[in-house]
């Protein structure tokens, strides 16, 4: 980025000096206006260099997501400066149209410099745009379009100067107004787009659809919801909720989250930071589990409810599932219960009855052979 910007800055400096100097000597208002445009290009080149230096800094304690907004702020400044340049050029040109004695009569040197500007700025546009696409830099892309507007404005200058040399005295001033309109319009588009980024405008729907498809291709991902994004310079940040089987282990859910994160980053949408929320159910539609008691409180409630059943929870593996706004309980019994299905069913029925009056609790399931399950896990 630094190299292409420095090359562009050197070209803008040379063209700016030539246009203003020759425009003054050859009496071309539109060429002088185009020279001011080139100097605005030079100013934006330095803004790009500043933003590139600070925007590429590593995240720190004060900027945990990096410094990408430096690029966005620089683009806003660039756009606003172009708008003011366009307004200034238009004001001066309109004033001269209403005062014919102030109109210029440009010479052939003005035409030659305008042609040189067309060729050189079109070349730097293509060069800068190639680098911008490779680096995924919106700021550098904006700077490339800035160069393209300079090339197009020089075409207008060619028409204006040529027409004036053929006797159409007003054409040079009209060409200057055309240049100012282009400069102001490009500035407005750049500033508006970057202001949207500063207000956390997200990725486009087409990009989000690509991300959704990448997520759903991952094994274990059953549904995607609450997919959100925002831009940070030339990068994008994404957070998403992914629904998985409600009975998965924590480690398998984490593995799915990691796979989803990698898939999003590899989806070629410029995403550099991903937060994946693993949900056992669609929390947009399912009843909320907010306010339900935690494990410690649940075990206290179960101890009191099952005291008469002679159940000692310290000898059982109790697993809690927070689903549908209620707590579903799985209890794994020790090896002594293996083959005692009648006892398990009787105990399960008694426990369900004990919990039936407690609205926070759902179903209860009992399973035997806890010892073998623990040995496999260990």
Image: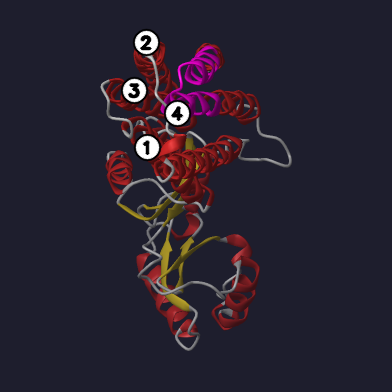
Residue at x-position 39% and y-position 63%: 340
Residue 211, given in percent of the width and then of the height, sits at: 33, 41
Is residue 276 visible from the viewing direction of this image?
no
Label whose residue precedes the other's in the sequence (4 or 1)? 4
Residue 367: quadrant of the picture: bottom left
Residue 64: quadrant of the picture: top right
* SS class, disc 2: helix
Q: Which residues are magenta?
A: 14-40
Residue at x-position 57% and y-position 40%: 77
User: Residue 29's mark?
Assistant: 4
Residue ID for mark 2: 112
Label whose residue precedes the other's in the sequence (2 or 3)? 2
Residue ID for mark 1: 182
* SS class, disc 4: helix
Q: Is residue 306 left or right of residue 265?
A: right
In front: label 4 or label 1: 4
- Report how far apart the C-alphas of labels 4 and 1 lie in the structure: 16 Å
């Amino acid at each position: 980025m630094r190299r292409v910007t420095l090359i562009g800055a050197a070209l803008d400096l040379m063209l700016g000096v030539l246009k203003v100097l020759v425009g003054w000597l050859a009496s071309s208002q539109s060429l002088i206006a185009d020279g001011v445009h080139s100097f605005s290009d030079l100013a934006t080149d330095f803004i790009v260099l500043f933003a590139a230096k600070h925007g590429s800094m590593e995240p720190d304690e004060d900027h945990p997501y990096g410094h990408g907004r430096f690029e966005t702020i620089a683009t806003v400044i660039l756009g606003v400066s172009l708008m003011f340049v366009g307004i200034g050029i238009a004001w001066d040109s309109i004033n001269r149209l209403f005062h014919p004695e102030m109109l210029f009569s440009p010479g052939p040197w003005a035409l030659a410099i305008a042609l040189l500007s067309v060729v050189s700025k079109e070349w730097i546009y293509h060069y800068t745009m190639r680098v911008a696409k490779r680096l995924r830099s919106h700021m550098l892309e904006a700077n490339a379009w800035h160069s393209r507007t300079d090339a197009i404005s020089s075409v207008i200058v060619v028409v204006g100067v040529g027409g004036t040399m053929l006797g159409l005295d007003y054409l040079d001033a009209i060409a200057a107004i055309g240049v100012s309109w282009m400069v102001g319009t490009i500035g407005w588009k750049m500033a508006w787009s970057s202001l949207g980024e500063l207000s956390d405008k997200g990725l486009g729907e087409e990009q989000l659809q690509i991300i959704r498809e990448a997520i759903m291709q991952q094994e274990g991902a059953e549904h995607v919801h609450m997919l959100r994004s925002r831009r940070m310079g030339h990068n994008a940040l994404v957070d998403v909720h992914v629904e998985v089987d409600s009975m998965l282990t924590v480690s398998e859910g984490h593995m799915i989250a990691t796979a989803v994160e990698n898939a999003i980053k590899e989806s070629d949408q410029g995403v550099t930071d991903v937060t994946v929320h693993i949900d056992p159910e669609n929390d947009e539609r399912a009843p909320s589990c907010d306010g339900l008691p935690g494990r410690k409180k649940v075990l206290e409630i179960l101890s009191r409810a099952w005291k008469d059943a002679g159940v000692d929870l310290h000898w059982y593996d109790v697993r809690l599932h927070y689903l549908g706004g209620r707590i579903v309980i799985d209890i794994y019994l020790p090896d002594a219960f293996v083959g005692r299905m009648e006892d398990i069913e009787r105990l399960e029925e008694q426990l369900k009855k004990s919990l039936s009056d407690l609205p926070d609790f759902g179903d209860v399931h009992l399973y035997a052979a806890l010892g073998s399950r623990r040995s496999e896990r260990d």
